Amino acid sequence: MISTKGITFSYADDQLFHMPDLHCDAGNTILITGDSGKGKTTYLHILAGLLKPKTGEILVDKTDIVSLSEAKGDKFRGKHIGLVLQKSIFIAAFTVLENLEMASWLATGKKNTERAKRLLEQLDITDQSHKLPNQLSIGQQQRVSIARALMNEPKVLLADEPTSSLDDKNAEKVIKLLTDLSKEYKAALVIVTHDTRIKEKFINKITMV
């Protein structure tokens, strides 16, 4: 569902990152690990189409997102790539439910309220649907981020350090939710992490050095 080949990236002319090739099928999970400063989050942003690599290709369901224009790339990402960022970012004036509805409206021009409510129920946060994001705990915010990332049934789900600010119990819950839901919705799941608590839970791993 997502694969890369020959990806390089540079913030400055004197520093070139060579990203490892990866392949992850629908419903499977791959972990990207490595010490801080090795380019893990940069790689995730490249996979999401937020950053443009200098060379290489990124195939998401046979579409090379590197070759897309900025406008087409934004549209493709909205429909096919779900993002769970390290720090949850929401529209502060919107309720939880409205934030999810906005995700579908931006991608399709329609508010998919039924799907939003179903995801909130699956993630056991239906009772938080009419609260503002700043009224939620960090663990609840992370669940809302997962729900938002799944709103448009993405082909690829990308998660950046999803457990870094969670205690052991909530970290376990979030990883189970991500893996279970990626299987249910048949999305390839790529997790960037340096969290030692979850590294041993996955067979498919890439370590950036």
Image (cartoon, rainbow, N blue to C red):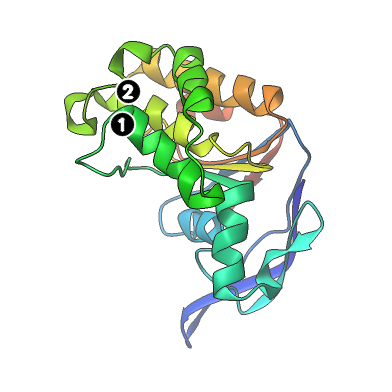
Q: Nearer the viewer, residue 76 or 207?
A: 76
Task: Please tell me which residue is depicted at 61% across the width and 68% down the height of the picture.
Answer: 72
Q: Disc number at residue 199? A: none
Q: Is residue 31 depicted above or below 66 in this figure?
A: above
Do we see residue 209 in this rendering?
Answer: no
Q: In x, y percent, where is residue 193?
A: 48, 40
The secondary element bearing badge 1 is classed as: loop
Q: Is residue 54 above or below residue 31?
A: below
Q: Nearer the viewer, residue 160 or 155?
A: 155
Which residue lies at the image location 41% right of the left edge and 35% below the top edge? 100
Query: Which residue is identified by label 1?
Result: 165
- Which quarter of the figure is the N terminus placed in? top right
The reply, left or right, for residue 165 in relation to residue 191 is: left
Residues 138 and 116: in front is: 116
Name the quarter where the C terminus is drawn.
bottom right
At which x and y percent is residue 43? 55, 59
Residue 202 rendering spot, x and y as whole percentages: 65, 28
**Disc nearer the start of the sequence (1/2):** 2
Do labels 1 and 2 touch, CB within 8 Å? no
Q: Which residue is mark 2?
A: 139
| Residue drawn at point x = 55 percent, y = 18 percent | 176
Q: Amino acid under label 2?
A: Gly
Relative side of 84 to 165, left or right: right
- The reply, left or right, for residue 196 in relation to residue 6 is left
